[in-house]
Each structure stands twice: as structure tokens, then as C-alpha cells.
Image (spheres, grey):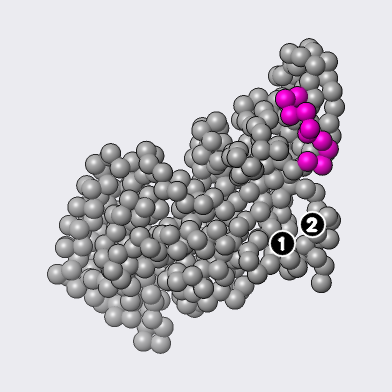
Amino acid sequence: MSTAREALETLRPTVAEIDVDAFARNVAAIRSKLPGRAKLIAVLKADAYGHGAVPLARRCETEGVAMLAVALLEEAQELRQSGVSLPILILGPLQPQQVNVAVEAGFTLGIVGPTQLQDACTLSSAARSVRIHLKLDSGMGRMGLVEADLDPAAVLLRNSPHVQVEAIYTHFANASDSRDGFTQRQIERFERMLQRLEPAGVRAPLHHIANSAATVRGVIGDSDFVRVGLSLYGGEPLDWEQSRLEPIMTWRTRIVRLKTLEAGEAVGYGTSFHTSRKSRIATLPVGYADGYDRLLSNRGFVLIHGRRAPVVGRVSMDLVTIDVTDIPNAAVGDDVILLGRQGNGEISAEEIAQKTGTISYEVFCNVSARVARLYRSSVGMELRTRGGRWSVVGG
């Protein structure tokens, strides 16, 4: 078996390192906030927001997570085929043929509308029960049953005794903003919808309304599920407060070229940057094909020796140039942090999101599949490379 060093030396130096122990600490921190009998659903959709669903799902199995949630049938299948045994909820809409596959595989269906509910009920039988979480639209306006759907849904469920409604849920639009009253209005509307369903015989032992932001804020019922994604990865779910969870991804590369340019020299496509002094310009083997946003051209920063160095010139497909004139000890081969901490410095997903006009979710998800993921934990390391190939590497 190759060592970690030997395996990594065969790769280019642009790697996203995932701290699996920090992920576990975030799970524990979230669980510590849950009241009573509330349970955690870990949201691992979009390959765990770019962090890698399979290795993190494996860790969830030892950390008291009650259920996993994904968006796609294929995502659920990948987890199960990788040996993950936790219950899996598929949140996204499914086509009729996908509903059949999902039911046969034993996945729980997130029912997001009348058509999918009809498909689930049609498939159910004494020989094949169907587990569902029924989604209500309390104001998000995307998926879920609206009030006009409730009575027909109740009739359908009463006539489908082999459909098990394990939970009823909704989704918040503005939970990240504690000053916005819309979250409370959604809660009230959700409660009214539940009260309409219950006399019709539609009830569930558990509800779930809280995403990461609502969970951190404590908007949780005593015996609810909570659905948490971003917070588990250390992203900041709140607009005005800090949740103080640990970012688990460090995206790093190395200097592969270093040159000195005289004042007035151009750098990069479109000659959008000209040196204003004699400058040391370093080149990094990363670009927008890896998910390093082109909008960081002449705006972004990286860390070298714990100090910030500006991105100069345009971000290209495979390369980024930075100005290290003020870091005189910078040299070829030096470690460069694109996202994460080094010394006393930090480049956060929130900082990158602010500079590129997006949100931290997209920053994480944009780190492309061609960037190898290295999973570090107290028990060793595991390497995932492009194409989903896995190799275990020793500590």
C-alpha cells in the first residue's frame, strides 16, 4: 500500500483537503443544540456541497445522525452502493420510473407535489410499503403541497394504507435573517396546514422545518427532525450573527513558476493588469476549470506563509497569477491556500462569495471534480480523484 506522500506526489498540487474530524465536531455541535427527542438529518446533496458525500456519510454513521438527505436518486444509489446503511431521504422531485426504483431500493421519498404523491400511492401495496415525508409549501413557493392540494391528498392517503407518512415538512425562505418576520409567518402557516390534515387522518410522528440557519437559531420543535447541510461543512448560515462552526475544507495549491517583471509589464489575458513597480509574479496551477471563479480576477486573495497575496490579471482555465512582491521569502513549491486557514490568515468561503456576488454554498459546490479530495482524520487518510476512483493511503 502506498503512503500518503507517494500517492500525492503523483497528482498536481491543487487539492481540496477535508478534515473529517472537524466535520464530526460540527455534527456534535449541532446535535448539542437539539432539544428533547429532536433528530439530525445530514444533508449530503450535491456530493455533500462539494466536500464528498461518501466519506462524510460513513462518518455520519458513527456520530448519531438519524438520516441522510440527498436531492437525486443517483446520489442515494451512490451512498447505498458504497455500503452506507443509514436511512436516506430523497428530497428532489422524481419521475414515475424513478419512484419505482427508489421504492424498490428502500429509500424514503420526499413528496413535493400531488403527482409524485399519486405515483407513490399507486406503487404501494401489501407486499410493498412506501415510506414518505410529505412536503407542504408554507411560503417558499417552489415545491410542496399548497392549501388547495390538502383535501385531495388526504383522500388519496386514506385510500393508500401502505403509504407510511413518516414525517411532514416544509422549507424556510429567510431563516438566515433573524430580523425577518417571514419565518414566523411560515411556521404559523405550516401549523395551520397540519391542523387541516390531522382531522382528515393525515398525521406523522415527526415534522421538520429547520434548515441550518433555523437550527443554529434554535427554531426547532421538541421531537422534530432538523435538516442541516451548510453548517456541517462550517459554512456560515446566518446573515447577522456568527455560528462559530469549523470550516472543514482547505483548498490548496503550490507556486509552480516565479518571475520578476519590470514596472509597466502586462499580466494575463486581456492585459487587465500592469505592474506599477518591479514585481515578483507567481503562477499557480489552478483556474476556473477547477472552480476558482473568474470573477476573482484582480480581486481575489490567497495565503502564502500566512500572508495575503493578491490575484493579478485574469483567472484563466488552468492558471492563476498572484503578486508576491511583498512576500520576499515566497518561492517555487510554497504552499498556497485558496480557501481555508494558514497561520493567522484565512480566506473564507464567505469572503470569496462576497467578491463574486454569490453565496458560500456555490463556492463549495463549484470546486470541480478534477480537484482531488484528500480526507484526513485521526485514523488516516483517503484520497478521491477524478472519476470517483478511490484509493486508501496510509498516514
Q: Nearer the viewer, residue 36 or 146?
A: 36
Q: Which mark is residue 8?
A: 2
Magenta-drawn stretch contains 327: yes
Q: Residue 333, how many percent across, how many down?
A: 82, 42
Q: Nearer the viewer, residue 361 or 252?
A: 252
What is the CA distance from the residue labelled 2 to the residue labelled 1? 8 Å
Q: Residue furthest left?
A: 199
Q: Point out the image quarter for the C terminus.
A: bottom right
- To which quarter of the image does residue 9 belong? bottom right
Check disc 1 and give the amino acid type: Leu
Q: Are marks 2 and 1 in contact (CB under 8 Å)?
A: yes
Q: Nearer the viewer, residue 316 or 273?
A: 273
Q: Secondary structure at mark 1?
A: strand
Q: Residue 298, how many percent across, how many down?
A: 65, 25
Residue 343 appearing in the image: yes
Q: Main secondary structure of the magenta part?
A: loop
- 334 shown above or below 86: above
Mark 2 / mark 1, whichever is N-terminal? 2
Q: Residue 78, how many percent across, how many down?
A: 59, 68
- 224 shown above or below 324: below
Seen at 51% across and 43% down, the residue is 360
Residue 271 falls left or right of residue 262:
left
**Magenta segment:** 325-334
Seen at 63% across and 66% down, the residue is 378
Please give the residue where the numbered disc 1 appears in the rendered image: 383
Q: Give neighbour class at mark 2: few <14, some 14-19, many 20+ (Cα, 10 Å).
A: some
Residue 210 falls left or right of residue 321:
left
Residue 174 falls left or right of residue 75:
left
Seen at 80% across and 25% down, the residue is 280
